[in-house]
Amino acid sequence: MDGSAAGEWRFTAPLWRWRGGSWHFVTVPQDVSDEVDATVGDATGGFGSVRVEVTVGASTWRTSLFPSTEEAAYVLPIKRAVRVAERLAEGGAADLSIRLVTG
């Protein structure tokens, strides 16, 4: 993990599939999840979501982090177009950067 600037983080995490379905996620490391919580406080969206801009390789998009009680951290959905473009496979590591989106 690398907290390079306020509201921005870089980390590497494995890609996993939600309960055998088509949704794929990475789990945001616990230390980063804690820092996101501390930064956003109560300013979350529906279901405790946090708006972010994500970069993986040459792909950048906006999405939300979602709190997961199962993972005890935030989880981040990785859409199919990004998985294909960046050649990400289930179980493989993804190098990501996330930036909080405000406003």
Image: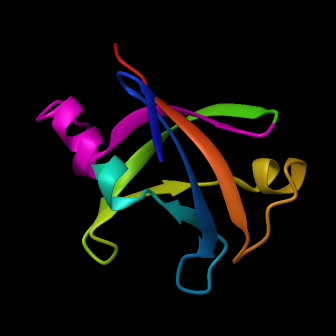
Query: Which residue occupies 24% across, 72% down?
Result: 69
Rendered position, 70 above or below 74: below
Quadrant of the rendered structure where residue 50 is?
top left
In this rendering, position of residue 86 left or right of residue 19? right
Q: Which residues are magenta?
A: 34-57
The answer to whether residue 37 is magenta is: yes
In this rendering, position of residue 71 left or right of residue 26? left
Rendered position, 24 above or below 87: below
Q: Residue furthest left?
A: 42
Query: Which residue occupies 55% across, 62% down?
Result: 26
Q: Position of residue 87 (x, y in %)?
A: 87, 58
Query: Which residue occupies 61% across, 76% down?
Result: 17
Query: Which residue occupies 21% across, 42% down?
Result: 37
Q: Position of residue 55 (x, y in %)?
A: 66, 35
Quadrant of the rendered structure where residue 54 is?
top right
Number of numbered discs overlaid on the protein picture: 0
Q: Position of residue 41 (x, y in %)?
A: 13, 34
The answer to whether residue 76 is magenta is: no
Instruction: Assign the C terminus to one quadrant of the image.
Output: top left
Q: Position of residue 92 (x, y in %)?
A: 73, 71
Q: Residue furthest top?
A: 103
In this rendering, position of residue 68 left or right of residue 44? right
